[in-house]
Amino acid sequence: MRCFRFLLVLFAVFVSGAAAYAASMSASASADAKHLHVQLVVPETVLSAGEPADIGLYFKLESGWHVYWKNAGDSGEPPHVRWTLPDGITAGEFQYPAPKRLPLGPLMDFGYEDEVLFPLTLSVAKTVKPGPAPLHAKVDWLVCREVCIPGKAELEVAATVGDHAGKTAASGPDVEIYKRLLGRLPEPSPQGAKAVFEPTATGFRLAFLAGQRETSAQFFPADQNILSNPTPQTVSPMATGLVLDLKKDPNMTANPAQLRGVLELSGGRAYEIAAVPGSVPAAAPPTTAGDAFRAAGLAFLGGMILNLMPCVFPVLFIKGLSLVQASGEAQHKQRGHGLVYTAGIVVSFWVLVGALLGLRAAGATLGWGFQFQSPIFLGLMAGLLFFLGLSLAGQFEIGLTLTSAGGSLAAKQGYAGSFFTGVLAVIVATPCTAPFMGAAVGFALAQSAAVTFAIFTALALGLAAPYLLLTFQPAWTKLLPRPGAWMEVLKQATAVPIFATVIWLAWVLAQTRGAESVAVLLTVFLLLAIAGWIMGRWPARRIPSVAAGLVIVFTIAVCVYGLNVFAVPVVAGNAATSASGVGGARWEPWSQAAVDKYRAAGRPVFVDFTASWCLSCQVNERVALRTPEVDAAFRKANVALLKADWTERDDAISQALTALGRSGVPAYVLYSSNSATGSGDAPVLLPEALTPGIVIDALSKLPAATSASAGNL
């Protein structure tokens, strides 16, 4: 493995060449190099003799590029720095934030994407005299994506040693970076926690016992050649912690005296641990068949209710129209439409769950609706619905074009439409969760693949059940009006909710990716309108159909390229989405540290797990959370309000949802304060569909001591 790593780095150096060392050699506090910005972060440039000083090395990386943790994994190297400091000033070692798993083919690296701060402490001796104290650093690093590029820079900050007394509070960009990223460092193990491991035939069983049940974790070994890094780590929850099954590195010759590293738990909690050999207690008993059946039943009910959620409602217009059209057909044809529609839903769920489990096996932390966190998916989805809306509004007939493409297809056209309507229902349903569904899906994603697929199949059948039932009950279909000219008007009216959904998707894209993404999306709509005009102007002709197809292919390319290049993440989405409505200014961005801080201070906490693309979340905000009566109840109970915005991918939020037994949004959690009830009380999960009464009732059940807590932080 070491030989492979050496060859990989050597290859990277060869590919990049001498130009890779084009980083700035000027002695400034920051430098821009290939694919990253590097900066010395010094919150306070006035140092005091005899007192330690904070400093850090900050990297801002281009999308898709990463630098490495202290154990880089299967390849790579962490950054290094050589200091030139005044006499009497010495620098400590880097501190490393908890890394991410970075899969690359069969390998697994550990590192950081987007941005990272490596803090360290300067020691300033008491004998250092006041005056200039330049802090000079020679930094080198390895930045990688598919290839690795080494870089280096010389950085310098003009600090001084002076009188600390009377100095005003530090502020500025360095302070902002330092405060924002310092919280990502792993903490020491909680007091009373215990980490032990025991060897197995293939690796190790690592137990972390902290006194409470844990459901998800990943372990990053501090030492190389101990574990097989790409192998998925199996988590077994326990009443007092969890057990991780780890596979050892095939080249390891002797068991280690300790398993040192970082253990990351749900909610972004990360701890430095050094597990010692010991007896690992038995994990929780496996899930019983009764548990799986109960979860499947909840999933079925949740799927049925999902039909009423605002995400699926536009698709129901389409199915309602097809039901009316099919009312004059033979009974066996109606049943055929119902079965094919059900098949479209079930197959779509299987594809979605397969992708979800596959990505999770590769180390990604994802949840229900994760695809809506991709701007390209949002753009393609908006384009598909816009094109469908044009057809429903009467610009062209998809059926005539299909007829021109192949005569035999015409006979199957109706069933194909039913199948893909089922597919569409699943796609637009994923931003929503319904009552009973959240707990079932959260349970399913923590089980074996077979149980997961079984529960999601129950959810799919629940979603399809109302329409399927109508097609199998002839008496009910006789109540439908007879087909006639009015159906064309109904079809055009069906375009209205479809276009409303398109507007919602464009709004979500603008919220998360800025005005440039909207410009790309409008271009996509223009091209699709041209394609639709061609299909409507020359229906059922081969050459215009081919031309329209080419325009559609070009449109897809424009959508993917444009959103990939121009869609820039909008910063501070939490604040933007939290300031609307009654009391909006009191909502703060969520973090586990903020929850712990408020509870320790004697305040209950309400957390709104939400996302801009979650229609159920937006509805709940307006009908319940932002109403004057609920806001008054929050104030009376002195509740701290936190919003966990999952619009963009956020592993900490994903892990927090997993710990709560949920896999998607919306999710609403009410914590009582530690001072009133002790630290071990479980949070209260509210239903996915909120009313003011549900929230006020939950607040009224808070322990009296918490409600009476006064004083804000």
Image (cartoon, rainbow, N blue to C red):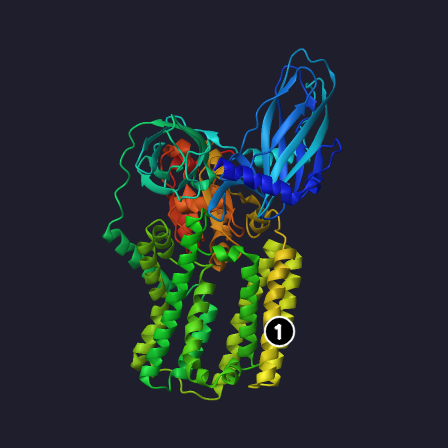
Is residue 35 or residue 193 the one in the foreground?
Answer: 35
| 606 horizontally vs 452: left or right | right
Residue 320 visible in the shown view: no
Classify residue 416 by image quadrant: bottom left
Is residue 699 or residue 619 the one in the foreground?
Answer: 619
The image shows residue 451, relative to residue 25, as above or below, that is below
What is the x, y in percent for residue 330? 33, 86
Residue extending farthest to the top is: 127
Is residue 50 or residue 93 the one in the foreground?
Answer: 93
Q: Residue at x 50, y 81 (%)?
A: 402
Assign a secondary structure to mark 1: helix
What is the x, y in percent for residue 219? 42, 37
Q: Residues within 10 Å of mark 1 (few under 14, many from 20)?
A: some
Amino acid type, residue under disc 1 in the picture: Val
What is the x, y in percent for residue 307? 40, 66
Residue at numbered disc 1:
551
Q: Residue at x 56, y 33 (%)?
A: 182
Q: Number of callouts in the render?
A: 1
The image shows residue 483, relative to residue 358, as above or below, that is below
The image shows residue 677, relative to residue 615, as above or below, that is above
Residue 582 visible in the shown view: yes
The image shows residue 633, relative to residue 622, as above or below, that is above
Residue extending farthest to the bottom is: 484
What is the x, y in percent for residue 622? 51, 56
